[in-house]
């Protein structure tokens, strides 16, 4: 089912509530050329055309203080940061604007995604209305993923216990894969070694 032609805006969601156990410290607060990963993600989605951005974070006091500089986003606290990402996404869906056609979902540990990729996904979705739109780089699927409002009920279904990836595969027949020249869509920063390489290559 295509998105309603009257709903031509896309909201953004930054998933940043995880405990970052492999990194050993909050990935969302890592530095990326003078801004934190979460600031970078919020600004990326805004530059890419998302009119409203939600950032889901853990409920620590440190976050409340340090997220004060994240302009252009509504901050949502996940009371169970050890939960799966789908739980954070469901929290965000409750705050999506009433007339948004869909949401662009970006995990915070993909700091190298380009704004042009967000633009390409958004434009493809608004032009054709696929229920799921994702980028691919040299045939590899990546992030962010755009979900149409028409699949929100599927995302909220408690039986979807394997996360949004299951829904993405369920829609293989009507999903749109957008090829982009952006290795950032498949480059996640999960470990101290990943972060070291990220800093060296900047």
Image (tube, grey):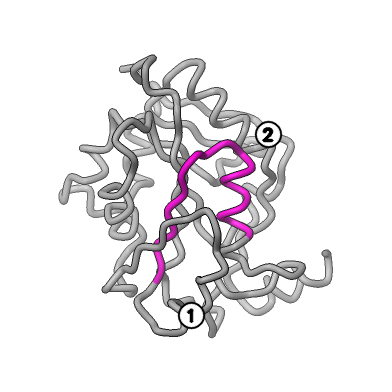
- Residue 25 screen position, x and y as percent: 54, 83
Q: Is residue 122 left or right of residue 138?
A: left
Among the two numbered marks 2 and 1 on one chain, the one whose residue lies closer to the N terminus: 1
Residue 51 falls within the magenta-colored stretch: yes
- Residue 62 screen position, x and y as percent: 46, 84
Residue in the image at 57% along x and 70% along y: 190
Residue in the image at 42% along x and 57% along y: 74
Q: Nearer the viewer, residue 161 or 123?
A: 123
The total number of labels drawn is 2
Question: Residues in magenta?
Answer: 40-57
Q: Is residue 29 above or below residue 146?
A: below
- Residue 17 screen position, x and y as percent: 40, 68
Give the labeled residue for mark 1.
65
Q: Quadrant of the N terminus?
A: top left
Secondary structure under the numbered disc 2 in the rendered image: loop
Q: Is residue 93 above or below residue 108?
A: above
Q: Is residue 184 above or below residue 80?
A: above
Give the labeled residue for mark 2.
180
Q: Is residue 155 left or right of residue 139?
A: left
Residue in the image at 35% along x and 47% along y: 164
Residue 65 falls within the magenta-colored stretch: no
Q: Is residue 167 above or below residue 160?
A: above
């Amino acid at each position: 089912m295509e998105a309603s032609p009257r709903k031509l805006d896309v909201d953004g969601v930054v998933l940043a509530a995880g405990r970052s156990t492999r990194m050993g410290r909050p990935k969302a607060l890592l530095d990326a050329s003078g801004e934190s990963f979460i600031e970078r993600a919020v600004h990326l989605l805004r530059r890419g055309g998302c009119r409203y951005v939600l950032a889901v974070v853990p409920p620590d006091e440190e976050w409340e203080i340090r997220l004060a500089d994240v302009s252009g986003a509504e901050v949502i606290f996940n009371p169970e940061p050890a939960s799966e990402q789908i739980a954070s996404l469901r929290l965000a869906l409750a705050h999506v604007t009433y007339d948004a056609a869909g949401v662009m979902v970006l995990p915070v540990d993909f700091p190298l995604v380009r704004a042009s990729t967000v633009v390409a996904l958004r434009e493809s979705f608004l032009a054709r209305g696929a229920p799921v739109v994702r980028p691919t780089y040299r045939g590899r699927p990546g992030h962010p993923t755009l979900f149409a409002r028409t699949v929100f009920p599927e995302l909220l279904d408690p039986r979807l216990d394997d996360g949004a990836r299951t829904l993405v595969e369920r829609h293989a027949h009507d999903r749109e894969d957008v090829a982009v020249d952006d290795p950032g869509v498949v480059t996640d920063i999960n470990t101290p070694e990943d972060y070291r390489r990220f800093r060296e290559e900047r």
